[in-house]
């Protein structure tokens, strides 16, 4: 396209004249700057360039980062990665060359961004999120995004979402609210990881993590303070009982003392909460990740003990009884993945008891079809949303709507391999999810999300609403 053709297409001569007249009327002391800003607003923004690269996540494992450019600026996004990719989630494309990062490099995904995706999206309006995402889905042509890679597609999708917000000159969370037709942006209750186990820590604790939820806080800022203070009191409690070694942390910042049972860990957390004086305001939650230690139809809570593994199997009925006892003994309001991802029978039976929120993570994999099945069978009462399991922002909005329409809770979640990208903080507010799970109140890649929530609450001022006691009803 020639310069004259570009000028004619965008009616720039008229727009330049309008900008000059506006500068005269405004009597601006800097007419060049005024005209420049006026023209930036007058010319519709389009995607002009997309650049992907390989970076490292919080575990030192490669992941994908994207810089997306429009005539309004550049917008960066990076995607996280989990420990285990499930058979029902979108494909995370890795090279598989054992000579490069032990097979974990993502240069194929990066190449797809820089060549195929870039070519398809240049010239598109960044505010049209669903069209951008659909263009990538059409380009990929596979059910699980195995051609381009969900990691490649999501990085571009998030970067485009940020560019769309900038084009509209609104905060990212507001743009997300608009995309989903939400009108009540809400600060979520954080589920802080305080004790780590399972595959996230080198201790003997079978379950993945113990969390605290400051439901009784009046603001997110107060919730963060409660979480931080409890975390540091817990460190003191652990140090007293296990010594300095017990204060080592897992991948997402939770302490990892060598516990013999989940009850031992819950007692430590209960003591820490009592020392803060927040006992009436903080509740507990556990992520069991039971698929990790399910063998056939039995559950081995001692699978990490070399001398005990295989000696104390529990049936699904035994596990239900254990959860009933835990909910009676501790202020537990949420249990994630209490059974194996294919144990639909027992998760439904436990959900039917109504003892607490039952969250589906491995059970659902943020997969539309599995969520529909769980809703139809009343198998759980909340969705754990991991955006990288889906692959685009638009599809994430769709599954959240599906869960909310079923009157489920929704918990937006980080991954074990995180980056400094804080997108899920804005996502949680824009979709009024009410709950966010993004690790301990320590480690930079986790705090990036919590600190972004603080900034947004400050920006909202008197309009800020913290989910609090309505954490599941937003």
Image: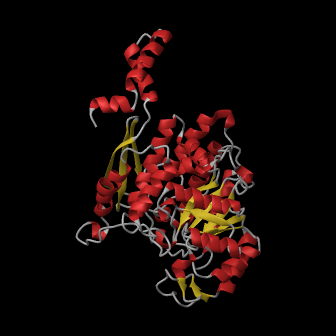
In the image, residue 239 above or below residue 358: above
Q: Residue at x 39, y 19 (%)?
A: 33
Which residue reaches farthest left?
Answer: 99
Between 431 and 32, the residue placed more toward the observer is: 32
Taking 416 as reference, is 235 left or right?
right
Number of marks? 0
269 or 439, nearer to the observer: 439
Percent position of residue 129, x then y: 50, 49
User: In the rendered view of the protein, which quadrant contains the N terminus?
Assistant: top left
Q: Is residue 325 visible?
A: no
Residue at 69% across / 59% down in the picture? 283
Looking at the image, residue 342 lies above or below residue 21: below
The coloring applied to the image is: secondary structure
Q: Nearer the viewer, residue 217 or 245?
A: 217
Residue 257 in view (yes/no): yes
Relative to 461, is 238 on the left or the right?
A: left
Rendered position, 363 above or below 277: below
Quadrant of the rendered image containing residue 320: bottom right
- Residue at horizontal 53%, vertical 55%? 394
On screen, residue 198 versus residue 187, left or right, reads left
**Measured along the vertical axis of the image, is residue 182 above or below residue 28?**
below
Residue 233, horizontal then vertical, whole percent: 59, 54
Q: How far from the left and from the top, in percent, is residue 193?
A: 56, 60
Q: Percent from the top left, x then y, of residue 43?
A: 43, 31
């Amino acid at each position: 396209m020639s310069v004259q053709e570009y000028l004619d297409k965008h009616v720039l001569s008229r727009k330049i004249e309008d900008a000059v007249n506006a500068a005269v009327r405004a009597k601006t002391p800097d007419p060049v700057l005024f005209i420049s800003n006026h023209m930036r607003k007058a010319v519709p923004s389009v995607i002009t360039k997309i650049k992907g690269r390989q970076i490292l996540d919080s575990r030192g494992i490669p992941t994908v980062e994207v810089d997306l450019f429009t005539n309004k600026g550049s917008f960066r996004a990076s995607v996280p990665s989990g420990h285990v990719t499930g058979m029902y989630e979108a494909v995370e494309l890795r090279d598989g060359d054992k000579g490069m990062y032990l097979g974990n490099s993502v240069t194929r995904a990066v190449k797809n961004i820089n060549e195929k995706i870039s070519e398809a999206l240049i010239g598109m309006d960044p505010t049209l999120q669903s069209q951008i995402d659909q263009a990538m889905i059409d380009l990929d042509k596979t059910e699980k995004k195995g051609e381009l890679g969900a990691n490649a597609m999501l990085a571009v999708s998030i970067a485009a979402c940020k560019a769309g917000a900038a084009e509209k000159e609104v905060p990212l969370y507001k743009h997300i609210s608009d995309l989903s037709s939400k009108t009540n942006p809400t600060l979520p209750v954080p589920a802080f990881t305080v004790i780590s186990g399972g595959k996230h820590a080198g201790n003997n604790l079978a379950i993945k993590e113990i969390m605290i939820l400051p439901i009784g806080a009046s603001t997110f800022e107060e919730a963060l303070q409660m979480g931080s203070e409890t975390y540091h009191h817990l460190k003191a409690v652990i140090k007293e009982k296990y010594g300095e070694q017990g204060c080592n942390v897992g991948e997402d910042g939770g302490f990892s003392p060598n516990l013999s049972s989940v009850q031992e860990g819950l007692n430590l957390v209960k003591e820490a909460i009592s020392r803060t004086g927040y006992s009436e305001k903080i509740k507990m939650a556990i992520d069991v990740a039971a698929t990790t230690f399910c063998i056939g139809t039995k559950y081995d809570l001692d699978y990490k003990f070399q001398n005990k593994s295989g000696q104390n199997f529990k049936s699904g009925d035994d596990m239900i009884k254990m959860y009933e006892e835990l909910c009676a003994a501790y202020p537990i309001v949420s249990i994630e993945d209490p059974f194996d991802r294919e144990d639909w029978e027992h998760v439904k039976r436990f959900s039917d008891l109504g003892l607490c929120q039952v969250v589906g993570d491995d059970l659902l994999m943020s997969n539309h079809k599995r969520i529909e099945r769980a809703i139809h069978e009343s198998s759980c009462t909340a969705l754990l949303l991991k955006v990288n399991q889906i692959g685009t922002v638009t599809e994430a909005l769709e599954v959240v709507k599906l869960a909310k329409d079923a009157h489920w809770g929704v918990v937006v979640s980080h991954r074990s391999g995180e980056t400094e990208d804080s997108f899920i903080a804005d996502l949680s507010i824009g979709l009024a999810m009410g709950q966010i799970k993004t690790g301990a109140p320590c480690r930079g890649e986790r705090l990036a999300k919590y600190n972004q929530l603080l900034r947004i609450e400050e920006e909202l001022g008197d309009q800020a609403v913290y989910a609090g006691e309505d954490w599941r009803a937003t």
